Amino acid sequence: MGMRKVAIVGAGITKFVRRAQETGKELSWQASKMALDSCGITLDDVDMVTLGTAPDAFDGVHMKGEYLADGAGAYRKPYMRHYVGGGTGVFSPIHGWMHVASGMADICLVVAEEKMSSCQPHPAGAFLTIFDHTTEQPLKPTLIWIFALEMNRYMQTYGISKADIARVSVKNKHNALDHPSAQVAEDITVEDVLNSETLCWPVNRLDISPASDGAAAVVLASERVARRLTDKPIWIDGVGMSIDTAYWGTRDLSYPRYVETAARMAYDMAGIKEPAKEIHIAEPYDPFDYKELHHMEGLLLCPRGEAARLTAEGYTARDGNLPICPSGGALGVGNPIAATGLMKVIEIFLQLRGEAGKRQVPGKPTCGLAQAWGDLMQMGTVIVLRS
Amino acid sequence: MVKRVGIIGIGTTGFRSITPDVSFRELIFEAARKAYTDAGIEPSEVDGFVTAAEDFIEGYSIADEYCPDQIGAVLKPTHTVPGDFIQALASGYMMIMTGMFKTVAIEAHSKASNIKNIDEVLGFALDPVYNRPLRETPHAIAGLEMTRYMFETCTSSEQCAKVVVKNKGNAMRNPYAAFGADITERDVMNSEPISLPLHRLDIAPHADGAVVTVLADGDTALALTDTPIWIEGLGWCTDTPTLEMRDWGEAAYARLAAEMAYKMAGIADPAGMIDFAEICDEYSFKELQHMEALKLCRPGEAAHLLESGATSFTGRLPINVSGGALGVGHLFEASGAHKILELVEQLRGHAGARQIPDVNIGLAQVWRGVPTATGAVAILSNM
C-alpha cells in the first residue's frame, strides 16, 4: 500500500507547573517555538497546524481552540483543534499524522496545551459537568469517585493490594527527578503513598497526578521533507484510537477494552505481532498509579492481572526489560492533560533518538509506544514510533 | 493511493426552533439512521467517525464522551473536532486519504434551545484578559464589523436588509427550514436595533437539528452508489483571534480558505465555474462580505449583485437557496452541516421545490461566529 510515511522531526516542551504566570497562548508559543527551533524551521515552513487541548472549563474560555490559535502559530494558516478528552495528547500527533499522510500537508505543527490553574477554586471542578445530567449528575459524583470505583474493581478482580499499586507512583516520581520539566519529582516510599491523605478510598493523594499548566509541541513531516530536515527522523508506524460507550456503568471496569482495540489497530498498522517482545519502551498514561498497570494490560504488554507483579520485580524500571514511563509520567512530570500525552510521545521520540540524557534507557530501543486515555474511562489512543 | 473522496449518504432531522420532544442524542440518532440508510450501509461497516462539538454549547465538559452510542461508533476510531462541521469533514477527508479508512461518518448537531444564557456563553469566547472585562456582547462586535464593512464598500443597511428578505423568502421553499418568512426590507429596518447598524432581523436566530454524512474513498463510493457527490476542494483557515489585530472590513479567513479550496479543486475562475453557493449569513452583511472574500464578485460589488437579482433563486449565481442561517436557523457547530446537506440535495437533484436546474459544482462556506476569525470552504460536484 502506498501510504505516505510520516516522521517526527522536532519537539518542544515547557516546564510543567502548578500555576504558570504565562497565559495559555504564551505556553503554546513557548512549546511551538522550541519545537520549530529544534529542527531548524520557522512558522513560514509550516503548512498546517493542529492543536489539542482538553476541556474549555479549565481555561474558562469558550471555543478555547480559537483563543489559542495565534499562540499555537496558526495565524492565517489551516488550523484545527481536535479533542478526545484525556486521550487528546496522544491523539494530537495522530491528527497531525492524518494531515501529512493524507498529502494535505508536508509539514504540520502539532501543539498540545493545558492551563488548568485558571479553574478556581480547583481544576477538579471542571470535571463536575462531565457526567450525564439526567442519570449521573444528581448523584453528585466527582472524577476521583469514579476512578476509586475503577481502581477498587481492578484490585478485587486480580487480588492486587494498594501497596502493589503504590510502587508505580514511587517509580514514576523517582524517574521524573531526571526530567527538566518535572513538577512533582521526588524520592518517596510505598509507605508515603499509603499514608498520604485518603481522598476517596482506595485513592490516596499520592496515587494521583497533580493539576498542572504546560504545553508541548512536535513537528511532523513527510518522508521527503523529514530526510532533509534531520538525520534522525522518528517514524510514526502505527496509530490507533477507540472510544467505548458513554454508559460506563454498563462496562466491566477491571479491563480497558477500548485501549486493547486502539492498540490492536496500531499494532496491525505497524506489523507488530507480539507487542510484549517487539515494543522496547512504553509510555502508557498514568494520571492515577493503577492506570499504568491497567493500561499495560490493555496494551497487551503483559497478561491481565500481571502488571503489578512485573512492577514489583523491577521489570518496568528504567533499566528493566520493558521500561514503562521512563519520563516520570503524569505522576512525576505533572499532568497538564493534553500536554502530558504529547510529553509522553516526545519522551519516546527522544529515547529512540538516544537523546534522553540522564533518562536514556539502556539497550538502544528502536520501537516504542505512547498511549493516553480519557473521556468517561472510555477513550484509548495509541501511537507506535520506530527509529 | 486514494484519489477521490465522495459523499455517499446524508441524513438530517431538519431544523426547528425548539425540540423539547427529543434529547440531543435522539436528534443525532435520527440523522445517523437516515444517513446510513441513504448510504446503504450498516454503522458496523463504517471505519471511522468524526464529530463536531464545543463543550460550552453542549453544556458538558468533555462533550465528546457522549458521541459514540447514537452514531454506532462504540469501540471504533472516533474523534471530535471542536470546530465547524466542514472542519470535521476535512478531518474525515484526511482520514480516508491516508488509505487507512474506507468509510468515515461525520456528525454535527445543535441543541441551542437548551441553552438558557447563550449571549453569556458566547461572551466566554472573548479574550479573558483584554476583552471580557469590557463586557461586549457578541452582537456588539458584529455591529462594529458591519459598520466597517459598510464603510469600506459603500454598502447601506437597507442593502444588507435585502439579504434577509431574500433568504427568509428562499426558506419558504425549504421544508427543513425553521424561519422562512415573507417579509420586506422595511420589516428588517423596523425591527428593534440590537447593536446598530444591526437590527434583530439581521441576526440569524438559532435552531436545533442534526446532520450525519458518510464519506467513502472513490472505489468504495462507486461500488455503493450511482450518484456519489465528490469532494473537489476543501479549505480552512484561522485569522488572528485578537480583535485588535484583525482587518475588520475584509473576511481574510474566508478568502484564504477559499484560495486553498479553489487550488485543490483546480478552479481558476470561481464566479464563472461555481453554479451555486451556500455561504455564511449568520448576520445579513456577512453574506455580502463573504461573497467578496470568496471572489464570487469584486470587493464592493456584492450588494449590487444582490440587487440585480443575480443571487436570487432564479438568478445567475443563486446564493443560499436553502434560506441560509437567516432562514434555516443558526446551528453553531452544525452550521456547515446544513450547507453541505443543501449542496448534496441540489447536486443529486433531490431539492424539490427549491431545485436549481442543471447544477454541477456547489460551494459551501462557513464562519465560526463572533469573536472568531475562522472559516472553512468545501466545493462539491456531481461529476
Image (cartoon, coloured by chain):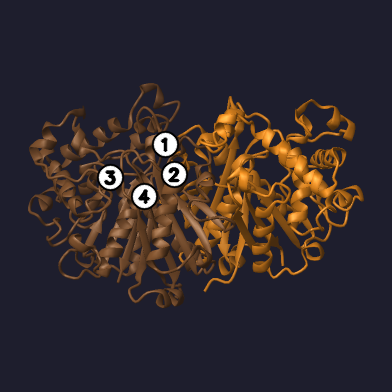
Chain colours: A brown, B orange
Separation of residues labelled 1 and 4 (CA atoms): 13 Å
Q: Earlier in the sequence, mark 1 or mark 3?
A: 1
Q: Residues under labels 4 and 2: Cα distance? A: 12 Å
> Which residue matches tag 3?
A334
Across and down, in percent, residue A138 comes to 40, 22
On the question of residue A330 being in view, the answer is: yes
Label 4 Cα neighbours within 10 Å, binned few <14 / some 14-19 / many ≥20:
many
Q: Compute the Cα span from label 2 to label 1.
A: 11 Å
User: Which comes sooner in the sequence, label 2 or label 3?
Assistant: 2
| Residue at x 32% of width, y 70% of height | A271
Q: How far apart in space, not on screen, are marks 2 and 3 (Cα)?
A: 16 Å
The amino acid beneath tag 2 is Gly
The residue pinned by badge 1 equals A58
Between label 2 and label 1, give the one nearer the viewer: 2
Q: Which residue is mark 2?
A: A24
Q: Which residue is mark 4?
A: A339
Is tag 4's residue or tag 2's residue first in the polypeptide sequence? Answer: 2
